[in-house]
Image (cartoon, grey):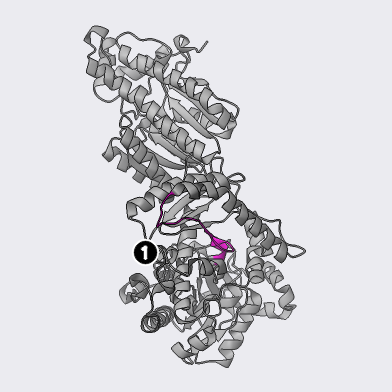
Amino acid sequence: MLDKHQGARLANLWDDGKAAGMTEPEKLLYRSNLLGSDKRITNYGGGNTSAKVMEKDPLTGEMVEVLWVKGSGGDVGTIKMDGFSTLYMDKLRALKGIYRGVEFEDEMVGYLPHCTFNLNPRAASIDTPLHAYVPKPHVDHMHPDAIIAIAASKNSRELTSKIFGDEIGWLPWKRPGYELGLWLEKFCQENPDARGVVLESHGLFTWGDTAKEAYETTIEIINRAIAWFETENTGPAFGGRSKPVLAAADRAAIAKKLMPVIRGLISAGESKVGHFDDSQAVLDFVTSTSLEPLAALGTSCPDHFLRTKIRPLVVDFDPAQPDVGNTLAGLPEAIATYRADYAAYYERCKRADSPAMRDPNAVVYLVPGVGMITFAKDKATARISAEFYVNAINVMRGASGVSTYVGLPEQEAFDIEYWLLEEAKLQRMPKPKSLAGRIALVTGGAGGIGKATANRLMQEGACVVLADIDETALEAAQTELSTRYGKDFVRSVNMNVTSEAAVESGFGNALLAFGGLDILVSNAGLATSAAVEDTTLALWTKNMDILATGYFLVSREAFRIFRSQKAGGNVVFVASKNGLAASPGASAYCTAKAAEIHLARCLALEGASAQIRVNVVNPDAVLRGSKIWTGEWKEQRAAAYKMDVDELEAHYRERSMLKLSVFPEDIAEAIYFLASDMSAKSTGNIVNVDAGNAQSFTR
């Protein structure tokens, strides 16, 4: 049966008050955003919408019919006005005169730019003819779970007729493209009263004379499908449960152990980022009797397939006897077998002009009793891939409950995956940034140096976990960075680096968030000033706990992850000029910083054989934005130099050899260098970023 979320009716969100006064293109945008706001209607980047609008030709001044349609690569839920392509309808109709037949349909994409209206730079998508040739002003193409469940059933034509009668037609499977556009036109001409059509193994087309009518028709048709499944699909999901569901904490614990190992095994060619999903829909599937046979069939909708590959990998794990050790030991062989099977699929299906085989690793990993893990080139893609497979699960739930679920035929799946037009789109993608797919954890991440470092790493495409003990500052830092780079790229954990349990928990949360770790920036700190005779044991211990023990604890946890991934790793300590150059009145601080530096040397020796690099950055007098330099420490140093606190920055600048102030961004730049492949052959090194201080020369 359907789960509660899948069975709930879609709300009609159209607001006449909001729509009043909108232009037709603005109503198209409004309608698109409403439809894309619910994943049951369409998934991220899936489906498209259009409107045929009369506009003044900028060349002739005459009114002409213009197709506004979602551009290539857009997402209807988040699209803005500049996300739509605009094309002359008369030119799109004229393309029929040069169409040479189905075997040449791909070449028609090259003619679409010649139809552009008003020099719009937004590239038209492959689905443009599907909208152009439907003889209705407003057209929606969505991928609703409930409709695809019908479309992916063995008797989908019969079910479509049974549920919708003559209102909604049916067309057999056809890859999206020019020919399908002609099929849709022919269907509409032969069925003038139809309100839409189900495309086998694909999705739903609906239309209307107004934007509101098109929107409400789409919602109505999907709701009718949901209601029908509610009545007809009353048996246990996927044939019933055959395996237990582990408790939430146990599921998370298993995922934390599996994810870095899987990541290490699949990241040889390209670093991957992971996502974990143990939602109810996923748990229903991964504990069912039908898990393995249904998973082997793959997905049906092309959009689902492109995001989730030919099929998932079902991990050999028994939740009734949850010993993950045997599973971990078996992962290398399981992943190697999947790669071999994928290579065989490529060889069976490749064409003479097929692109070279791409990454043969699975995207989706299903763990019985635990959930679903997905890996992709970045967190957003991994998360979206999981969302697509949840859509696929909902489709399989519906189809297998009322009929026999049918996946996309293997050759058709291959022809979509290795479609030359899709390959051309991939080749146009920008070159990955230098830290794309890398995962970093930054302690002291909410402070000046920590936040500047996170910002610098994220500029280069890294995912970052901010770890800090200051919850208020941590929340503000995460908000700032997620606003700048996107929520997918940053997480935060409250971590007291002196607590073994807090460190283990924080790193575990990082694993669950992103699937592994590549970079540790150990930056948590404090600064104290006192003559040795005035230094209490508590003050001494506090320095040692945070600056020595804390660095040890986070490094130990990072090393454990690095070794489980077997893909190297990178540790950067933020120490201090005072770790090399002694200062009077700060014996506890200087000694602890010296301990950091020597710990880094020890770790560089230990990690080298596993390609784990450990390096140190030594800042000095980084006042701006630093939490250390607020309050007591700043006042103490000013008192020691017999000056006002406002004079400190100038004092340190003039004290330096280069007569320059040092800022958090300067330290972040050095950390980025040591964390990146630019320093791939450097370990055990110290980089001073202090504007020049002879006392802290390393030799």
Give the image location of residue 80, x and y in percent. Answer: 45, 62
| Residue 594 covered by magenta stretch | no
Q: Which residue is mark 1?
A: 280
Instruction: In the rendered view, tell whether residue 19 sits above or below residue 277.
Output: below
**Image-based side of 6 in relation to 165, left or right:** left
Asked whether residue 28 appears in the rendered view, the answer is: no
Give the image location of residue 166, x and y in percent. Answer: 49, 92
Dot 1: what SS?
helix
For residue 355, which quarter of the picture?
Answer: bottom right
Give the image location of residue 677, x and y in percent. Answer: 58, 34
Give the image location of residue 143, x and y in percent. Answer: 48, 72
Magenta-tinted stretch: 305-323
x 44%, y 45%: residue? 257
Residue type indicated by callout 1: Gln
x 46%, y 66%: residue? 43
x 40%, y 41%: residue? 465
Instruction: In the rendered view, tell whether residue 113 sits above or below residue 371.
Output: below
Q: Nearer the viewer, residue 88 or 636?
A: 636
Quadrant that contains the N terminus = bottom left
Q: Main secondary structure of the magenta part?
A: loop
x 41%, y 78%: residue? 215
| Residue 313 covered by magenta stretch | yes
Circle 1 crowding by C-alpha within 10 Å: few under 14, some 14–19, many from 20: some
Residue that sits furthest to the front in the current view: 321
Asked whether residue 214 appears in the rendered view, the answer is: yes
Instruction: In the rendered view, tell whether residue 235 sits above or below residue 310.
Output: below
